[in-house]
Image (tube, rainbow, N blue to C red):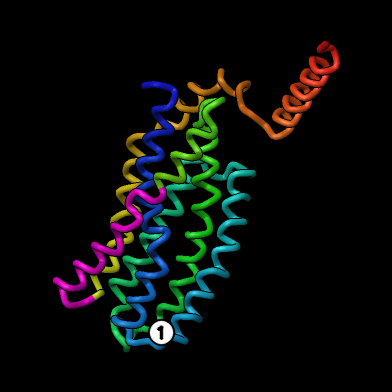
């Protein structure tokens, strides 16, 4: 496998799980309003709770990486598993107006997992990028996030129409999370990827390096101009 192989496999998994990361709020909103019969104000509170709880999730993700409590791959996997468990729980136990109050106990964990995944996936990506390919790989990373962005909503709508209920349609998000997770676990060998890019790290472009190169280039041009007849 080429040096870019592990990074490409990561991007493939990322394309799946990121589609659910971006769709979870809108699909959960439809679930809350239609399946649970809650009000728009209730959804606003739930959305705010989700966003607020994403903050400690992101901070915890950074702490996990700093302290090396989990490996880079395990940290991403943990966030995806937590997100999936939350929505499996919702499908099993929070599916009617009688049980709708339980949603307030689930959303903090879902928000925490959403905050956790973003630093974790970027830490993993950076570890696997060959030196000198940063712009290429980050561009591919951004592109990958939009490949399947339409898919969860379309599948959610199709399932809700065919089943006449949103209860099982909400499992669309765990479906994409778990496909991405399987791709990560099966296709990405982090240790091998890190070893393969190790001898390219000197090619990494840093801001200071770029500024220095620019200054040297400017100085060279000035010398050429000053010595021109």
Q: Is 76 rendered above or below residue 196?
A: below
Q: How many marks?
A: 1
Residue depicted at x 52% and y 47%: 120
Q: Is 215 rendered above or below residue 220?
A: below
Q: Is 218 rendered above or below residue 157?
A: above
**Number of other residues with Cα within 10 Å of mark 1, as a class: few under 14, some 14 to 19, many 20 or more:** few
Residue 194 at x, y percent in the picture: 51, 27
Closest to the observer: 187 or 69? Answer: 187
Asked where in the image residue 5 lies, by quadrant, the reply is top left
Residue 97 at x, y percent in the picture: 32, 87
Q: Which residue is mark 1?
A: 101
Left of 158 or right of it: where is 205? right
Residue 14 at x, y percent in the picture: 40, 46
Residue 135 at x, y percent in the picture: 53, 34
Quarter in which the C terminus is drawn: top right
Residue depicted at x 28% and y 57%: 151
Residue depicted at x 46% and y 47%: 76
Q: Where are the magenta residues, as a range?
A: 145-165
Residue farthest to the left, as pictured = 162
Q: Is residue 89 magenta?
A: no
Closest to the observer: 77 or 69? Answer: 77
Task: Considering the whole magenta stretch, tell me its main secondary structure.
Answer: helix
Residue depicted at x 29% and y 71%: 91
Left of 68 or right of it: where is 160? left
């Amino acid at each position: 496998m080429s040096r870019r192989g592990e990074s490409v496999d990561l991007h493939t998994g990322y394309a799946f799980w990121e589609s659910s990361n971006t769709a979870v709020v809108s699909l959960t909103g439809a679930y809350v309003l239609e399946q649970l019969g809650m009000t728009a104000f209730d959804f606003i509170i739930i959305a705010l709770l989700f966003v607020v709880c994403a903050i400690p999730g992101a901070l915890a993700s950074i702490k996990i990486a700093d302290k090396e409590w989990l490996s880079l791959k395990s940290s991403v996997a943990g966030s995806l598993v937590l997100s999936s468990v939350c929505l499996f729980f919702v499908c099993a136990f929070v599916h009617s107006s009688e049980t709708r109050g339980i949603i307030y106990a689930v959303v903090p964990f879902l928000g925490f997992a959403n905050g956790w995944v973003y630093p974790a996936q970027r830490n993993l990506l950076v570890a696997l990028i060959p030196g000198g390919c940063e712009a290429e790989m980050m561009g591919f990373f951004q592109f990958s996030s939009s490949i399947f962005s339409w898919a969860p909503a379309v599948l959610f709508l199709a399932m809700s129409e065919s089943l006449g209920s949103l209860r099982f349609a909400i499992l669309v998000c765990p479906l994409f999370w778990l496909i991405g997770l399987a791709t990560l676990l099966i296709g990405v060998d982090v240790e091998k990827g890190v070893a393969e890019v190790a001898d390219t790290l000197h090619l990494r472009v840093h801001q200071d390096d770029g500024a220095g190169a620019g200054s040297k280039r400017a100085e060279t041009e000035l010398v050429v101009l000053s010595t021109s007849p």
